[in-house]
Amino acid sequence: MFTNQDFEIFNDPTLAGRMQLIKTVIDPKFEQLAPLIIDHLQQPNGAPFYAHVAKHLRRHKNPPVDTWVAFSQNKRSYKAWPHFELGLWPDRLFIYFDILDECKPSVQAKMAIKDLTPKLMALPTGFVISNNHGEAKTMPATPANITAAIQKFDQYKHSELVVGRSVQVGDPLFDDPAELTATILTTFEQLLPIYDQVMNNR
């Protein structure tokens, strides 16, 4: 399970060094957790979920600023589909549901994103929301911020929708593997109704 020490991989300033640490320290943990997460996401008679561990193939000079494993119901890819992500920024672990730029048109063609408002508003305290998966910064998922994020998603062509929970470096959860695992699984379960609504309208 993830520990505070895992975030030290981001201290390596080189592409080769950080990539090696991601592959040897972080990716095995993603691969270990993936079957458990898929088991919690999978629904009776539903299409299977697949894990996609980030390969960072487009990185040729600068080291990755974050890393993740994504879960989608497409065996070959995830960015063009609504999906879930578990990953690390240098200062936090994140557990998110994403509608990225690549799949935004297909989602908007089938539904009004504002229809997600009731389910987003029902999320527990502690969830966060954002319009850019490429930045670590998020906002608390308050009613005002949810409304603003939905409006921005609709108004700006390349805005995205990212919602979930993060665990900051130094949080006591990193000292309790069982509790951290439970938090990850519970968060995905709480995000699943949002995913289902999007996919049922897709």
Image (tube, helix red, strand yellow):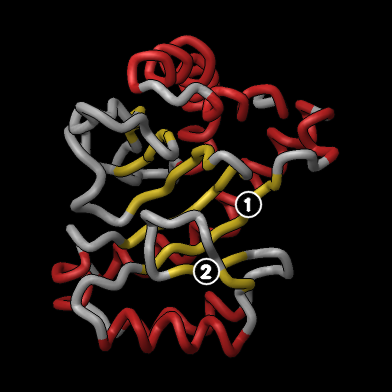
User: Where in the figure is residue 130, as x and y percent of width and height?
Assistant: 47, 68
Percent across and percent down for residue 26 are 51, 21
- Residue 35 seen by the camera: no
**Residue sitting nearer the eye, 191 or 30:** 30
Taking the spot 37% from the left edge, 54% from the top edge, the residue there is: 134
Kind of residue at disc 2: Ile
Residue under the point 44% across and 38% down: 66
Quadrant (top left/top right/bottom left/bottom right) for the N terminus:
top right
Instruction: Name the residue carrying label 1.
Output: 166
Ranked by sequence position, the earlier of labels 1 and 2 is: 2
Crowd class of label 1 (few under 14; some 14 to 19; many from 20; radius 10 Å): many
Secondary element at image label 2: strand
Please tell me in which quadrant of the rendered image residue 17 appears.
Answer: top left
Q: Amino acid at mark 1?
A: Ser
Q: Quadrant of the C terminus?
A: bottom left
Residue at the (25%, 44%) spot, across then down: 78
| Nearer to me, 148 or 91 | 91
Q: Which residue was labeled with disc 2?
A: 129
Q: Position of residue 152 (x, y in %)?
A: 35, 84
